[in-house]
Amino acid sequence: MLRREQAEEIFSRIQKYASADEVECLFYGGQFALTRFANNTIHQNMAEENFGLSVRTVFNGRTARATTNKFDEESLRDVVRASESLAKVQETDPDLLPLADPGQAGCQEGAGLSRHFAQTAELTPGERADAVSRMVEIAEKQKLTAAGIFSSSENLEAVFNSRGMRAWHSQTAAEISVTMLGEDSSGWQKANSPDVSRLDPRALAEIAAEKAVSSARPREIPPGKYTVILEPAAVLDTVGFAFFDFSGLAILDQRSFLNNRIGQKLFGDNITIWDDVGHALQSGSPFDGEGVCRRRVQLVDKGVVKRVVYARASAEKMKRSEHAAKVGPVEVTGHGFPIPNEMGEAPMNVVFESPAETKTVEQMIASSERAILVTRVWYIREVDPYEKILTGMTRDGTFLVENGKVVCGLRNFRFNQSLIDMLSQVEQMSVPVRTSGEESFDMVVPAMKVKDFNFTEVTKF
Amino acid sequence: MKELASWVLNTTAQRGADYSDVRIVNDRSRALATKNGKIGNASEGQSEGFSVRVLLDGAWGFASSAELGRRAAEATASRAIEIAKASSKVKQSGVRLAPEEAVTAEWTTPHRIDPFSTSVEQNLGLLQKIDAELRAVSGVTLAETNLNFRREEQWFYSCEGASIHQTKFTTGAGYVAYAFAGNEIQKRSYPNSFGGQWQNKGYELIDELKLVENARRVGEEAVALHRAEQCPEGRFDIILDSSQLGLQIHESIGHPIELDRVLGMEANFAGTSFLTLDKLRRLQYGSDLVNVVADARQEHGPGLGTFAFDDEGVPAQSIPIITAGLFTGYLTSRETAPMIGAERSGGTLRAENWNRLPIIRMTNISILPGHHPLSLEQLIASTDHGILFQTNRSWSIDDKRYNFQFGTEMGWEIQHGKRARMLKNPSYSGITTEFWNSMDAICSRDEWTLWGTPNCGKGQPQQVMGTGHGAAPARFRNVKVGSAYKGT
């Protein structure tokens, strides 16, 4: 791993070579390994080590970035030269802010908990293969075939700047995803954690296998509006499309579904949402792309959209804009992406608040006369950006629930569903859990029982 | 580079590898963007490294490093061997590679103007000019422009003796005008969504695209969509413009023909395919007007899937995928070709960069144009009642690639052979083979464009790859329209 002292030394050389008014460096990268299996065989198995250095130079209202993965003398000179060449030829932007000042204290790591675990960092290809072997055994026992991944990594993320900023975060991550395939059915599970010891490959494989077995010989029922029980992964990949709109710059750009809606009750009373990097189930760096500490922010309170998040520049711009009076609190929250960028900021550590009364998925099933249980959703895309209508498919375990019991597997549906309507029609929720999907960043979300979910078509399997 | 490769290949040979190859890549990129007249992005990137792929005891190992010295070369090679040993713990049968002649070759993307030789002032000046045109239109609330260049130099060496040096140039540019009013956000993109048009070409592409000339019209269309009527729901004859047909090909032909998907290798993420092996040369995929090829050769054009050799040293080829409507071919690699009895790989294995394992990727998956002269306007004139769909806005398809739904930025109702009225929020949906069998007309070569899709995601870890799709406007009969807004 690139050590902090090495980064300090590289940064001092970058400062020496630069002629810019101000200089910022991002350091990133680490070790990453992934064991991939399919047809009960490890068919791809890789490892890499790579570190990057991204240099941003600032000349009186002009800025640009250049990136390299080479740290020799010539490459460092080149990356500074490239950044300065791009910056110097621009027109001056009076709105460009000077670099961020370092905070008085460092950003607090998640709830005082370390997100770096030696066991995860030191995981070997042999240990990953052994875990895969245990998952494959479960598949073979059930006459299924298994496909999936087991990855592990150790990463760093750092922001240094010429104003003295020295933000540094390193953490580990491990992830398992498994799909079990039968003749005409499939089941899926996925989990990740900074601590590999918290992952249970056998349990994930067993649940996926059970879903594949119990959804065999799927029935087809007509599309229409149904009560659905969305497992956490299905919730995650659907709601994930909302959060890039909880951004000050998205409001300023008038590309957010929250334009003219902040302060309104958009969702049900039972929906309260935070962004909280310090949450015990969250992961990631406690600072943003400029090194500013991420603050805990309440985005939605009992269905009312309270506010959005801000990078430094977006907050400044918002204060001077026509939107300022109708967007709630305007202040830097530490959610910016590295500058320059077109997106501004977004809450990336979303946590749904647990409702007063939680239900397990089993209780949701037991309380349903007729409903559809959805394991995961797939290929979600935005149909209408302001009404937030999303389309997508169910996948890897869709079940019919009748009279409080799972009756059979179902052929997969296409949905076209307004996210606003969906979060207004949540009847029951589970305890929120750390969840990982394929369409969205990881969040802490509950399973949800939602009425009148809009399925518009059925596919062939 | 050859010396680095020899350090790697000597190490893997000494440690008992049955097969090994090395890819060394130097990658340079420039990304510029504006947003409402200000710089949205100004960045350059440089990345260099190598990877080692080994086959040992019938199992794969792969390791990569950014260090190009001897110590790193030997350590990375040894690491790949250790990983292959771990892989061999969980296998059903050993990997067998289709034979391929090892060649020594040199190739560079044909280009007139090295994009990196153009000045940043010139690049930003162009974007600012487009931005000004877009924002000159009253009602445009957000204007975004972008310009992207990439130069990817790769050296490939294998233990079989291959030595291939390729340099690929990619250029891409485009813009979007947004109009927010009332309860609607509408947008128009040019020349296409996904950042515009992308090709393996030099800066000459930018001049060909007539970016500034079209900007005012595109801004006006974004605003006009607010006054347009909602696309109706029902069954209609539809015409897809060539860029939308390009994406339709990508999603409902390009992905299902990937043999790794068919064989279950992508089941956990990208999914599988309805094109099971029994369907080869038996399935009537489309009407007899549907002729599709996977063509990576230079003579097909400057697509994002054009190269001389793939990332395991197999020469670029043209594979007939659909021939007069009959399904005739898969995308294959040296590992997967023998599994369907093919004697040779189709040459489609590609990696995103030096640190990623090459996997089967679309090359240029193109529908061939009609033989008889037919322009878009003539096609519209021959349509009594239908809807013209222009420029993709949303796209979604199931994990076996049967059921799809696409939305486009703009539609036109066609009545009695004429564009009658503009439609907003148009969408259509269907089942892949039913849809392609309903195609009854396709325009001729002068309406055919080789589009670039720069953002195709596949693999774990996910790799983003550029693919090419040649298409001309085409008509499909009795297609379901408007489901995207049904019940919402």
Image: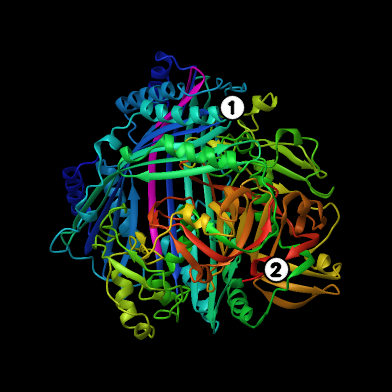
Q: Mark 1, chain letter?
A: B
* Front residue of this view, candidates A190 and B379: A190
**Residue B303 visible in the displayed image:** no
First to last magenta residue range? B41-63
Indicate the quadrant containing the C terminus of chain B: top left, top right, bottom left or bottom right. bottom right
Measuring from the top left, give residue B240's x and y in whole percent: 73, 62
Q: Tag 1: residue type?
A: Glu
Q: CA distance from mark 2 to mark 1?
A: 43 Å
Measuring from the top left, give residue A60's x and y in whole percent: 26, 70
Please determine whether, in this image, residue B189 is positioned above or below residue A16. below
Q: Quadrant of residue A55?
A: bottom left
Please determine whether, in this image, residue B238 is positioned above or below residue A233. below
- Report the residue marked by disc 1: B335
* Residue mark closest to the camera, 2 vs 1: 2
Q: Main secondary structure of the magenta part?
A: strand
- Report the residue marked by disc 2: B482
